[in-house]
């Protein structure tokens, strides 16, 4: 029997529809689910339920209005025999005994637990519950997925416990991709839960971000921001600041129509375009390739200068590029003329112009 990510426990009387809906949603996200008791077939029912529950990492309890009504007396007490014979109560008891990751989910108007639950299942009322309703369905669904213990979740836990090893965020995400395909929302919630968990243990937020983004290039960091639904414009300095604002819950990390970050063209792309124009002739392109040798990039020398600088700026931050490549001052001036579209933007010595370019690309102006 293969392990399942989730076992769904529900009262068929009024919880089956919600359980089926949740099962379908989770399976579309790549989460494996044991749901339908009728699928057990000829196997011994008692043994099959216990085996499937035992092999599942999480137990989702669909708390519908009638889930705890079986065996309940008029005074709120419970009939011990009825509790012992009822399979929903047995599933809850076994889940508690086996210390499963139990997540109660209120549905169909249910909003709490009875005051006098049988002692053997009373622990369910102390678990942090979620409510699935029309108003906050997507938000709470994302929270639920973020709390599930799945292979991705376990990989993330392991990764953040070993941050001092030579493992980057890029390595982590590539490992996650090896598992069954899930939605971006699931990966986002899992990743953010773990990043925030680690983040709270760091007193120096800039140092935490430096560790999290160690050895990642500009293109990967842009993709990370894009998948998180936040601004992905600029160079590494701008991207790091955006990620820091996002993790701190600041709205400035999100896209705003009146923001410079929403200009028609990413300024980093405009810089690559300007470098491409500055080195567009055959001789100039050859000079550029000589200058860029220090970066040890395996270029396709048949490609255009624009393509070459797109590749450079995808792998190297702008400050890192200028630290490693000694561009002639006249070329920097020409790039500034193209970038700022006026002569004044190219006035000044080389160091001043490089600083102006870096500030522009990182939206500091």
Image (cartoon, rainbow, N blue to C red):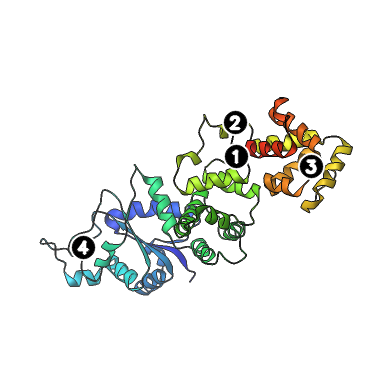
Eye-nearest disc, 3 or 2: 3
Compared across the picture, whether 16 is left or right of 295 comes to: left
* Nearest-to-viewer mark from 1 and 4: 1
In whole angstroms, how far apart are the C-alphas of marks 4 and 3? 79 Å
Q: Quadrant of the C terminus?
A: top right
Q: CA separation, marks 3 and 2?
A: 28 Å
Cα distance between the residues tagged 1 and 4: 57 Å
Q: Are marks 4 and 3 in contact (CB under 8 Å)?
A: no
Q: Is residue 259 left or right of residue 292?
A: left
> What residue did someone put label 1 on?
233
The reply to whether callout 2 and callout 1 are in contact (CB within 8 Å) is: yes
For label 4, the SS is loop
Query: Is residue 297 visible from the viewing direction of this image?
Result: no
- Is residue 95 at all visible to an observer of this figure? yes
Is 344 displayed left or right of 222 in the figure? right
* Whole-percent x, y for residue 155 in the image: 53, 64
Residue 327's mark? 3
Residue 311, quarter of the rendered image: top right
Instruction: Kindly state the secondary structure of the residue where label 3 is placed.
Output: loop
Circle 1 Cα neighbour tier, 10 Å, few/some/many (<14 / 14–19 / ≥20): many
Q: Is residue 5 above or below residue 138?
A: below
Q: Position of residue 287 (x, y in %)?
A: 86, 42
Residue beneath disc 2: 263
Residue 70 circle label? 4
């Amino acid at each position: 029997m293969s392990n399942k990510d989730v076992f769904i426990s529900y009262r068929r009387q009024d919880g089956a529809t919600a359980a089926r809906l949740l099962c379908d949603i989770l399976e579309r996200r790549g989460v494996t689910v044991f749901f339908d008791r009728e699928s057990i077939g000829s196997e011994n029912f008692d043994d099959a339920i216990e085996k499937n529950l035992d092999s599942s990492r999480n137990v989702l309890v669909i708390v519908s209005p009638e889930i705890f009504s079986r065996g309940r007396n008029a005074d709120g007490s419970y009939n011990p025999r009825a509790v012992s014979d009822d399979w929903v109560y047995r599933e809850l008891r076994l889940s508690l005994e086996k210390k499963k990751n139990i997540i109660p989910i209120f549905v169909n108007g249910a909003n709490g637990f009875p005051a006098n639950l049988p002692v053997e299942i009373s622990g369910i009322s102390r678990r942090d519950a979620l409510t699935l309703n029309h108003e906050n369905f997507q938000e709470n669904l994302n929270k639920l997925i973020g709390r599930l213990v799945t292979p991705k979740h376990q990989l993330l836990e392991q990764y953040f416990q070993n941050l001092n090893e030579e493992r980057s965020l890029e390595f982590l995400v590539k490992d996650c991709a090896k598992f069954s395909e899930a939605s971006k929302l699931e990966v986002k919630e899992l990743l953010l839960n773990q990043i925030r968990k680690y983040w709270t243990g760091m007193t120096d937020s800039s140092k935490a971000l430096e560790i999290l983004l160690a050895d990642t290039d500009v293109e990967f960091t842009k993709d990370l921001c894009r998948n998180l639904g936040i601004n992905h414009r600029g160079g590494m300095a701008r991207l790091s600041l955006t990620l820091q604002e996002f993790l701190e819950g600041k709205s400035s990390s999100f896209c705003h129509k009146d923001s410079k970050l929403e200009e028609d063209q990413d300024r980093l792309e405009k810089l690559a375009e300007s470098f491409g124009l500055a080195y567009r002739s055959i001789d100039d392109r050859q000079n550029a390739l000589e200058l860029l040798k220090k970066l040890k990039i395996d270029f396709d020398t048949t490609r255009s200068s624009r393509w070459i600088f797109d590749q450079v700026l995808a792998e190297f931050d702008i400050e890192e590029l200028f630290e490693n490549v000694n561009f002639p001052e006249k070329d920097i001036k020409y790039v500034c003329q193209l970038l700022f579209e006026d002569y004044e933007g190219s006035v000044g010595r080389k160091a001043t112009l490089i600083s102006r370019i870096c500030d522009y690309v990182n939206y500091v102006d």
